[in-house]
């Protein structure tokens, strides 16, 4: 059985010829392959390490399980879909809501494990019935709205938790990260979040030296005098050791909050597979269901031991596009590096020490990007919001999700925010479509007197998600 772990040497193994690409089944020399693997780990460091910290989970376990999940993904896709799996930012809002309801880390990972199982089942369905099942149940108007409400639901987390810890550091980090994303080129722009973290560490250290302790809320929410950058835990941490494993617990209220993220993950995977296929020239439609299922298996395994869920990462698409090296050998090298990082508690202590103000500046951009990727899905799919069939369910669901509207059914059961907003978007769209007159289903522009032609809701492919994933995760 071909597991995609045999690679032909590309050329002389040193530098690809001008215009040439290193295909997934090829590799450069092993030292160069190892260097590319390390580059992939650095590229996903910013977002993929920020996410578990924001979720309150062990960053060492997060990086270790990202390596394990990547290996599972590469084996499942037989080495045809080069990809590194990192913690999805889509789950950060879910974790915040669950913790606000009194949930523990075990509750968070239990809810997300169920999401991984659901994603696995979606992948099996796609393998059996084809990608059309995704387009039929989750057209771009639905997918975009859900991604948007997940992102914007996070705004209060930044505003109330991270930004107040050190508003001036947050402002400077936000400005620096934004400049890095826009002004830098190639690989450097792909690691802008990582550069923002380094800048934030540095400016926090300088502020502590110049201004002393800050009087503000700390990570626990108490107003105290404290150092912006506290590295005391780094000195106490060992160089080698196992991360903090723990089992999940399952609560229906938490599971219902987490399940809508399945839609975002399907969009992420569909976009990733399509983008990689376009870059390599290899039609990968037959691997979409496998990729989704492998993502689900990796997430289940990670959350079963206390880690965060994992998904394909757009930062690594950027590295592939910049280097034109699509060798899956580089991703195996990245997975090995991730395992080694996971066995270094001192490394995890450095990540856990990220100052709150630094997170405030970074999450302003990250959370906003998640929300606006939903809008990008609409733009690329040419969704027409002049049609009430599109406008009404999306408008209602987004306001419910962003405003954290709550529907109480019994004393022990209620739906709110992300879960309720997603249900309104999905059921609202399909119910209205079933009842709507035929002229609305043809997507005729109805709400303005514009003369531009209309090109439909664009439900015929995941290209929008592909473009969105290229923009960032």
Image (spheres, grey):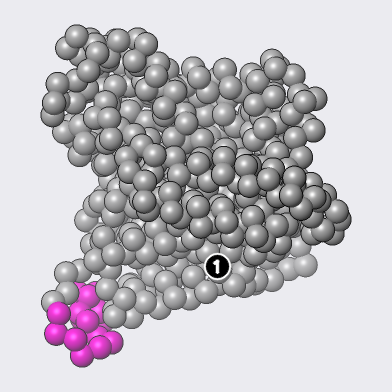
Question: Based on the displayed image, in which of its 4 quarters is residue 431 positioned?
Answer: bottom left
The percent coordinates of residue 200 (x first, y second) are 60, 46
Which residues are the magenta region? 437-452
Q: Is residue 410 above or below residue 31?
A: below
Provide residue 48's location: percent of width, then percent of height: 53, 39
Say whether residue 159 is magenta. Answer: no
Identify the residue at horizontal 69%, vertical 43% (top origin): 205
- Pointer 1: residues within 10 angstroms few (<14), some, or many (20+)? many
Q: Position of residue 204 (x, y in %)?
A: 67, 47
Q: Is residue 245 left or right of residue 457?
A: right
Residue 130, above or below 418: above
Image point (36%, 51%), residue name: 183
| Residue shown at the point (44%, 75%) measured from the top left | 395
Give the residue at the far bottom of this rendering.
449
Q: Is residue 437 left or right of residue 182?
A: left
Please give the residue where the numbered disc 1 appears in the rendered image.
401
Q: From the image, which quarter does the N terminus lie in?
A: top left
């Amino acid at each position: 059985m071909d597991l995609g772990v045999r690679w032909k040497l590309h050329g002389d193994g040193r530098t690809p010829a001008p215009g040439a690409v290193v295909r997934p089944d090829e590799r450069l020399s092993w030292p160069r392959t190892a260097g590319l693997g390390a580059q992939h780990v650095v590229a996903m460091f910013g977002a993929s390490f920020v996410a578990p910290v924001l979720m309150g989970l062990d960053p060492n376990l997060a990086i270790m399980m990202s390596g394990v999940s990547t290996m599972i993904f590469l084996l499942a896709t037989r080495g045809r879909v080069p990809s590194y799996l990192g913690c999805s930012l889509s789950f950060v809002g879910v974790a915040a809501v669950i913790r606000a309801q009194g949930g523990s880390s075990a509750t968070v990972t239990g809810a997300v494990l169920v999401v991984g199982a659901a994603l696995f089942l979606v992948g099996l369905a796609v393998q059996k019935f084809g990608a059309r099942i995704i387009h039929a149940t989750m057209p771009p108007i639905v997918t975009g709205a859900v991604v948007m409400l997940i992102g914007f639901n996070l705004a209060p987390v930044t505003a109330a938790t991270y930004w107040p810890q050190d508003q001036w550091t947050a402002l400077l980090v936000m400005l620096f990260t934004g400049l890095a994303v826009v002004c830098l080129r190639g690989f450097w722009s792909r690691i802008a979040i990582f550069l923002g973290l380094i800048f934030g560490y540095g400016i926090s250290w300088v502020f502590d030296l110049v201004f002393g302790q800050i009087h503000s809320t700390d990570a626990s929410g108490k107003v105290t005098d404290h150092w912006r950058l506290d590295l005391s835990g780094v000195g106490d941490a060992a160089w080698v050791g196992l991360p903090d494993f723990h089992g999940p617990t399952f609560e229906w209220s938490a599971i219902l909050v987490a399940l809508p993220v399945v839609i975002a993950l399907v969009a992420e995977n569909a976009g990733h597979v399509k983008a990689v296929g376009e870059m390599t020239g290899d039609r990968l439609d037959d691997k979409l269901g496998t990729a989704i299922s492998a993502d689900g298996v990796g997430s289940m395994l990670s959350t079963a031991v206390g880690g965060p869920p994992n998904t394909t990462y757009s930062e690594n698409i950027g590295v592939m596009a910049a280097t034109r090296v699509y060798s899956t050998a580089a991703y195996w090298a990245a997975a090995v590096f991730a395992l080694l990082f996971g066995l270094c508690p001192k490394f995890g202590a450095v990540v856990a020490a990220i100052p709150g103000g630094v997170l405030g500046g970074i999450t302003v951009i990250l959370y906003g990007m998640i929300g606006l990727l939903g809008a990008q899905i609409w733009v690329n799919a040419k969704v027409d919001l002049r049609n009430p069939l599109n406008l009404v369910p999306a408008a209602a669901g987004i306001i419910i999700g962003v405003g954290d509207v709550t529907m109480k059914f019994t004393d022990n059961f209620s739906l709110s925010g992300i879960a309720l907003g997603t249900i309104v978007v999905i059921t609202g769209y399909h119910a209205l479509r079933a009842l709507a007159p035929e002229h609305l289903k043809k997507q005729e522009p109805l709400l303005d007197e514009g003369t531009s032609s209309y090109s439909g809701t664009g439900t015929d492919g995941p290209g929008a998600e592909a473009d969105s994933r290229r923009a960032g995760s």
